[in-house]
Image (cartoon, rainbow, N blue to C red):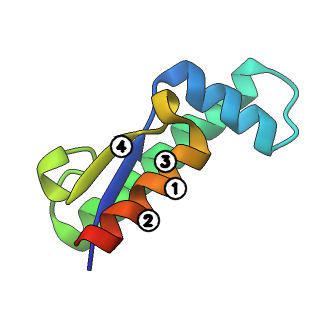
Amino acid sequence: MISVYVHADHDFQMKSALERVSMSGKRDGENTSNGTNKYRSDFYHYHTGRSWDDAENYDLCINSGKLGFEKTVELIESYIKIK
């Protein structure tokens, strides 16, 4: 198993959320993103007892805001081949 944590800055997350889902504005995007991140954090903590955003819990951490989605996927695939 390889664990990967993909993160991005707030602006990139909002832009991405608005592109994926039809929302009426920035506030809706922020509410959706915050709710999703809270759910993920709670789920991860419930099942592992660890913090979702702690880099030490992962084999690979990637800032998709800097790489973009395509390069992020390429990096993960390359890591899997190396591992």
Q: Which residue is mark 2?
A: 77
Residue 71 is situated, as x and y percent measured from the top left of the image, at: 53, 45
| Amino acid type, label 1 | Val
Q: Secondary structure at mark 2?
A: helix
Q: Earlier in the sequence, mark 4 or mark 2?
A: 4
* 50 on left or right of 1: left
Please name the residue shown 58% across and 26% down the image.
Answer: 12
Residue 40 bears which disc, if any?
A: none
Q: Quadrant of the C terminus?
A: bottom left
Measure the C-alpha gap from mark 3 to mark 2. 9 Å
First-in-chain label (1 vs 4): 4
Place of residue 45 in the rendered image (x, y in percent of width and height, measured from the top left): 25, 60
Instruction: Identify residue for label 1.
Output: 73
Which amino acid type is shown beneath numbered disc 4? Ile
Dot 3 amino acid type? Thr
Regarding mark 4 in the picture, which secondary structure is present there? strand
Residue assigned mark 4: 62
